Image (spheres, rainbow, N blue to C red):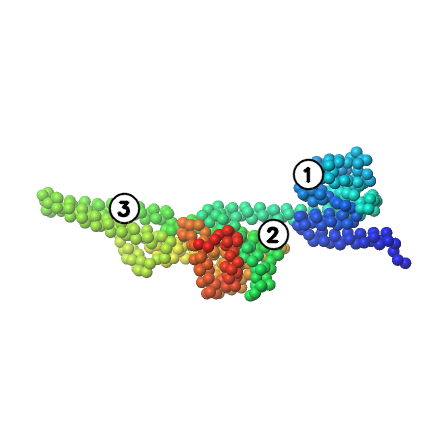
């Protein structure tokens, strides 16, 4: 026996509620979820339009940014208006004739030009039975009034919506929590080394832009590579936090601008001042000895001879200090300078106790002999250890399933495809880390002048990256996309230089 039309229609509506419940349970974006609920609510009760209000318990207000017919967010005091009354009492309000009911406020109709005839407003209740908001339907189609079946169906839909909205709000809170944590972590990184301020953010912008550029790439090994919104968020977090481990590196090593630390250079300068005084003292002693041997009449010629000799000795000492200051800069050590440093290690001066003391100490020779940059091998290993610190730190965080690869992606940003990178020297590198490597090097090269380096122009930075890609250290295909898609210009608004 065929079902009656009314029963078929009711079954269709119940099926629709089940279908939308599945869709709502999968949606975590509140801006997409709320319009979906309203669309289905309008269909289920066959109304002209619907509005949805969520209860803000802290402010004792109802708020909505999906009230059909309004483009702006609406806030209502608890208990105000029909929606406020339903939220306050938890009771359904079904009005067959709006203008005949004293609870109806016609001001919205006046301002919008809309004419309200019938109203059905029901509470949304969570699993505990607490009211979390209301759904309000206006004007049953066909000039009908809302009946008990409409109330039942809208209540059922409201219960499903309440759970979905609660999940979406919790998801938003988790996102805000992670965003706040990541932002605070970046502040901590940059507080250790203010000269690199903005680096983490720029690397994140560059890397995410490069990932998005793959969507438009139709040839080569990355033609089918696509990243979802959640995967892009995971990549952004990994990029923002890739240097967090620097908080575990000694600050004086982290910001070392020259081969000698400031206190070491100051000690060296003080020693050279003692050496100057020693030369002047030795000159005075020679003058006295000469007068005793040659007589007082020879004093003018003695002074002339000693002044010339002292000036030459002081000039030689100053030249040595100037040479050491040059060696102290973070430039490539010129060929032959290492041998001269070893020779200078033989120089000495006489201290206050007439004991000979070396003018240049072994540890100073070792530091000044650094062939490139400012870091000794031990200090460079300490700097490189920041990747291990980053991985250990990020691995302690209970990331969501969608973000669980953040530690792994950050861990590999200094690895090279030819196995010469660090800390593990492995060639198997996630594509996200490959992109980050290119962007990290580019920003490190082009960033504003730092104490230990000058900024490199955009075109020269690309040449350096091209060389590394050509030698098999960086991903050549990703670098090609980086250049062709003009990632620096798009991500940083930086033009060629």
Task: Report crowding for label 2: few under 14, some 14 to 19, many 20 or more residues within 10 A (C-alpha).
Answer: few
Task: Report crowding for label 3: few under 14, some 14 to 19, many 20 or more residues within 10 A (C-alpha).
Answer: some
225 to 151, vertically: above or below: below
**Corner quadrant of residue 145:** top right
| Residue 32 seen in the current view | yes
Label 2, on which residue?
Answer: 398
Q: Residue at x 88, y 54 (%)?
A: 4
Task: Report crowding for label 1: few under 14, some 14 to 19, many 20 or more residues within 10 A (C-alpha).
Answer: some
List the single residue furthest toward the right. 1
| Residue 203 seen in the current view | no
Residue 367 drawn at (x, y percent)? 36, 54
User: Which sits earlier in the primary sequence, circle 1 or circle 3?
Assistant: 1
Label 3, on which residue?
Answer: 274
User: Which sits earlier in the primary sequence, circle 1 or circle 2?
Assistant: 1
Can you say which quadrant of the picture contains the N terminus?
A: bottom right
Q: Residue at x 45, y 62 (%)?
A: 467
List the single residue furthest toward the top. 102
Q: Report, in whole angstroms, how far the alpha carbon at label 3 lies from the one at label 2.
A: 59 Å
Q: Residue at x 62, y 56 (%)?
A: 228
Image depth: mark 3 or mark 2 in front: 2
Position of residue 145 in the picture relative to residue 237 (left or right) = right
Position of residue 9 in the picture relative to residue 202 (left or right) = right
Asked whether 435 or 332 is in front, the reply is 435
Image depth: mark 1 or mark 2 in front: 1
């Amino acid at each position: 026996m065929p079902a009656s039309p009314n029963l078929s229609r009711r079954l269709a509506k119940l099926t629709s509620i089940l279908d939308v419940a599945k869709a709502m349970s999968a949606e975590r974006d509140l801006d997409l979820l709320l319009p979906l609920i309203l669309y289905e609510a309008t269909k289920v009760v066959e109304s002209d339009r619907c509005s949805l209000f969520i209860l803000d318990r802290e402010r004792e207000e109802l708020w909505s940014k999906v009230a059909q017919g309004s483009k702006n967010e609406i806030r209502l005091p608890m208990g105000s208006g029909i929606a406020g009354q339903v939220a306050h009492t938890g009771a359904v309000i079904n009005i067959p004739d709006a203008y005949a009911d004293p609870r109806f406020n016609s001001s919205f109709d006046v301002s919008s030009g809309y004419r309200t005839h019938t109203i059905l407003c029901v509470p949304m209740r969570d699993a505990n039975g607490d009211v979390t908001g209301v759904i309000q339907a206006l004007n049953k189609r066909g000039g009908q009034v809302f009946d008990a079946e409409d109330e039942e169906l809208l209540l059922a839909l409201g219960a499903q919506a309440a759970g979905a909205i609660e999940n979406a709000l919790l998801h938003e809170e988790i996102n805000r929590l992670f965003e706040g944590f990541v932002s605070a972590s970046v502040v901590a990184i940059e507080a250790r080394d203010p000269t690199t301020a903005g680096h983490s953010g720029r690397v994140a912008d560059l890397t995410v832009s490069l990932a998005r550029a793959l969507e438009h790439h139709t040839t080569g090994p990355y033609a089918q590579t696509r990243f979802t919104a959640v995967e892009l968020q995971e990549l952004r977090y990994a990029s923002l936090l890739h240097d967090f481990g620097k908080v575990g590196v000694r600050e004086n090593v982290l910001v070392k601008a020259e081969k000698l630390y400031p206190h070491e250079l100051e000690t060296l300068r003080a020693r050279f001042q003692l050496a100057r005084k020693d030369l002047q003292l030795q000159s005075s002693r020679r003058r006295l000895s000469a007068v005793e041997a040659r007589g007082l009449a020879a004093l003018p010629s003695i002074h002339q001879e000693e002044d010339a000799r002292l000036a030459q000795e002081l000039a030689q000492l100053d030249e040595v200090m100037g040479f050491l200051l040059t060696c102290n800069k973070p430039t490539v050590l010129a060929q032959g300078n290492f041998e001269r440093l070893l020779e200078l290690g033989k120089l000495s001066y006489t201290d206050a106790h007439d004991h000979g003391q070396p003018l240049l100490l072994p540890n100073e020779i070792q530091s000044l002999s650094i062939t490139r940059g400012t870091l000794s091998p031990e200090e460079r290993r300490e700097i490189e250890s920041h990747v291990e610190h980053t991985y250990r730190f990020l691995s302690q965080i209970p990331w969501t399933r969608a973000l669980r690869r953040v530690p792994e992606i950050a861990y590999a940003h200094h690895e090279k495809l030819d196995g010469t990178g660090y800390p593990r020297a492995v060639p198997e590198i996630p594509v996200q880390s490959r992109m980050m490597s290119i962007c990290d090097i580019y920003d490190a090269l082009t960033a504003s002048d730092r104490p230990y380096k000058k900024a490199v122009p955009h075109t020269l930075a690309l040449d350096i990256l091209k060389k590394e890609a050509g030698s098999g250290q960086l991903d050549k295909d990703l670098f090609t996309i980086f250049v062709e898609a003009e990632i620096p210009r798009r991500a940083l608004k930086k033009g060629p230089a």
